[in-house]
Image: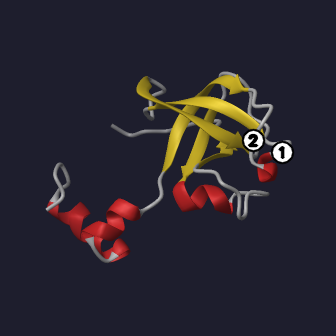
């Protein structure tokens, strides 16, 4: 059982990921807004030259959610931009981040989100 998930969605998730454990291990992509920058004079050598930004999760309507995170910027995002953030293993697939110690990467600047409620 997956709390809060209906039967049809549960079947879709289990088909795609094989098990509940697979769903839990899955990477996520989420919408966020750039709210700040991070300056780090000492960091892993594989991150030298990488731009680090503070992002805050937002819902599809642009309303701020509670979560903040630091993400490596791969698309030259700027303050207040709405962005797409890949997390987990997906973050390390972003341009220039193969084998880098990152868990969040900005992989797109979002122009429009169209939600049919």
Residue closest to the eye, 14 or 19? 19
Figure label count: 2
Q: Where is the C terminus found, in terms of image quarters? A: top left
- Of the pair 114 and 30, the residue shown nearer to us: 30
Q: Are marks 1 and 2 in contact (CB under 8 Å)?
A: yes
Query: Badge 2, how many Cα within 10 Å: few under 14, some, many 20+?
Result: few
Relative to 87, residue 57 above or below: above
User: What number is the disc on residue 48?
Assistant: 1
Query: Percent x, y for residue 13?
Result: 31, 67
Residue 107 to residue 66: above or below = below
**Colour theme:** secondary structure
In this view, which residue lies farthest toward the front?
42
Please state which of the two labelled residues, at mark 1 or mark 2, is closer to the viewer: 2
Identify the residue at horizontal 66%, vertical 28% (top origin). 81
Left or right: where does residue 24 sit relative to residue 11?
right
Residue at 38 percent of width and 40 percent of height: 116
The N terminus lies in quadrant: bottom left
Dot 1 falls on a residue whose secondary structure is loop
Left or right placement of residue 80 versus residue 4 in this view = right
- Measured as percent of width and height from the top left, residue 3 is found at 16, 52
Mark drawn on residue 14: none
Image quadrant where residue 112 sits = top right
Query: Who comes first in sequence, dot 1 or dot 2?
Result: 2
Tell me the residue at 36%/73% (across/down): 17
- Residue closer to the observer: 77 or 20: 20
Label of residue 43 in the image: 2
Q: Tag 2's secondary structure?
A: loop
60 in relation to 15, above or below: above
The residue lying toward the viewer, choosing from 75 and 62, is 75
Horizontally, is 61 left or right of 37 in the view? left
* Residue 104 locus on image (x, y percent): 59, 47
Q: Is residue 34 left or right of residue 18?
A: right
């Amino acid at each position: 059982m997956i709390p809060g998930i209906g039967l049809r969605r549960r079947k879709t998730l289990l088909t795609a990921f094989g098990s509940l454990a697979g769903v839990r291990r899955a990477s996520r992509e989420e919408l966020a807004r750039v709210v700040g920058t991070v300056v780090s004079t000492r960091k892993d050598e594989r991150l030298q030259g990488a731009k680090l930004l503070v992002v805050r999760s937002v819902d599809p309507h642009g309303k701020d959610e509670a979560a903040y995170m630091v993400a490596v910027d791969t698309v030259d995002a700027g303050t207040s931009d709405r962005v797409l953030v890949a997390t987990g293993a997906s973050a390390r697939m972003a341009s220039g981040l193969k084998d880098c110690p990152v868990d969040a990467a900005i992989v797109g600047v979002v122009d429009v989100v169209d939600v049919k409620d």
